[in-house]
Amino acid sequence: MHETNTSYADRANAYWTGYFTSRAAIKRYAARQLEFFRGRRNSGPNTDSLADALAIAQHHDAVTGTEKQHVANDYSKQLSIGYKKAEDLVSSSLAWLIESPLLTTCQNTVTKFLKELKSF
């Protein structure tokens, strides 16, 4: 069996023991933001900042967790900003759908149908 959670050393007495497990929170945060894009082929200008932040979070230092703390903080900040913009897009889209004349028409049709059923 291949052990993937072993220590890594790039020179004598210089072990990267947290190489595979460091900064788990930011890695999970980035993975959750990727869920927004699951199943999408094209994003758009309203989701570009999240796409950009996710691309940066794939940098080799971010993936391995070897970046300095201020860089990890910046990755988190960029992901947060991108997520907020994407969340605003989803919220406004849902609000539009709820207030859509098409939805009102459908509701009126259902109401009319139910009234007709009661009259039988």
Image (spheres, rainbow, N blue to C red):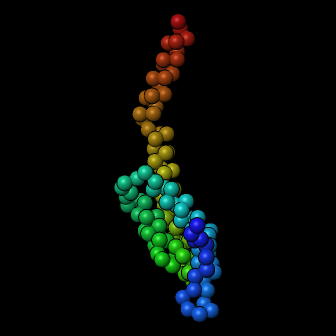
Q: Name the outermost residue toward the front.
A: 1
In the image, residue 41 sits, relative to residue 58, either above or below, namely above
Q: Position of residue 93 (x, y in %)?
A: 46, 48
Task: Report the residue at 61% width, 76% height from top.
Answer: 6
Disc tally is 0
Task: Report the residue at 43% width, 60% height from top.
Answer: 47
- Is any part of residue 48 visible from this angle? yes
Task: Report the residue at 53% width, 8% height from top.
Answer: 119
Q: Position of residue 88 (x, y in %)?
A: 50, 56
Task: Report the residue at 45% width, 44% height from top.
Answer: 96
Q: Position of residue 94 (x, y in %)?
A: 49, 45
Near-viewer residue (92 or 53): 53
Task: Say whether residue 3 is left or right of residue 46.
Answer: right
Near-viewer residue (118 or 65): 65
Task: Say whether residue 52 is left or right of residue 69.
Answer: left
Q: Position of residue 109 (x, y in %)?
A: 45, 23
